[in-house]
Image (cartoon, rainbow, N blue to C red):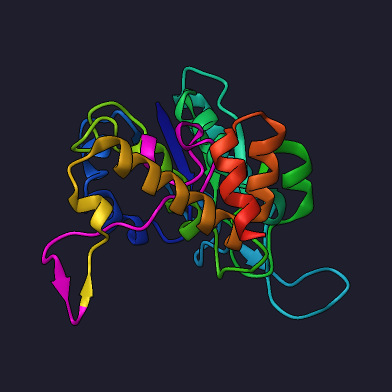
Amino acid sequence: MRFDVITLFPELFAPFLVSGVTRRAYETRQVDVRLWNPRDFAEGNYKRVDDRPFGGGPGMVMMPVPLAKCLAAIKAERADPAPVVLFSPVGDRLDHAGVERWSAGQGAVLVCGRYEGIDQRFIDRHVDVQVSLGDFVLSGGEIAAMALLDAVARLQPGVLGDEDSHQFDSFNPALDGLLDCPHYTRPEEWEGLGAPAELLSGHHARIERWRRDRRLEITARRRPDLIDRARAQGRLTPADEALLAKLA
């Protein structure tokens, strides 16, 4: 799959693309990331890409012309009609299901806004999807783009050291959409705190029941909406319901 990223700061992506386990996806081009600077498509000596907003107000607004020219160059190079994604506070919140959809697709054009935002006419004419990471505002869309790329890359075959690793992540359907349980490693005792006896027992059924119970406890405490969803989908067992009844 191919992701073309429109950004005024392509240098921010340099360490991201060569660090950590997901670098395998970028090095092999399983996730082919190409960076485009709209300033390269701006006119004049100063290559201006922003201007003051009509009607007054603070900040600057990214102009539509350099963005549109940059997008046209991307589309001319791509063979597929990739969706254009803008990271924006008004977008739909990204979740695991959304990441899975992107990871199974052919990629997209990711537009990273800056300043007060992007001229609405470019959005109306060219943007297909708007995505938000949550109810907060970033200085630009680059961090959001990296978050999407990282989440997509780790779902690609051969990227993680253990092929099944992501199946045990929070929100994964393999965990019925629950939050993941706590994890422990050596030493068995640290600063007077021991690892749970169940995890040291070697008894697989006890270990799995302990992990399931902890997932239910954490999810019920932190994200009860996920418990409601799992229940509505018929994913909770009688043993699950018995534990949740005790916690209520």
Most foreground residue, 15 or 62: 15
Residue 246 picture location, percent across and down: 61, 56
Q: Within the magenta stretch, is there residue 180? A: yes
Q: In which quarter of the image is residue 98?
A: top right
Prevailing SS of the magenta stretch? loop
Q: Can residue 131 be seen in this view?
A: no
Residue 5 picture location, percent across and down: 46, 45
Tell how many labels.
Answer: 0
**Which residue range is magenta in the image?**
167-192
Residue at (45% x, 38% y) in the render: 4
Q: Quadrant of residue 155?
A: top left
Q: Within the magenta stretch, is there residue 241? A: no
Residue at (35% x, 40% y) in the render: 208
**In this image, 1 relative to 26: left or right?**
right
**In this image, 193 relative to 221: left or right?**
left
Residue 197 picture location, percent across and down: 24, 57
Q: In which quarter of the image is the N terminus?
A: top left
Q: Which residue lies furthest to the left in this view?
A: 187
Q: Quadrant of the C terminus?
A: bottom right
Most foreground residue, 39 or 27: 27
**In this image, 224 relative to 240: left or right?**
right
Image: 156 above or below 86: above
Residue 146 picture location, percent across and down: 42, 52
Q: Residue furthest top?
A: 79
Most foreground residue, 13 or 9: 13
Residue at (61% x, 36% y) in the render: 84
Q: Residue furthest right?
A: 55
Q: Can residue 97 be seen in this view?
A: yes
Image: 233 above or below 177: above
Residue at (47% x, 23% y) in the render: 104
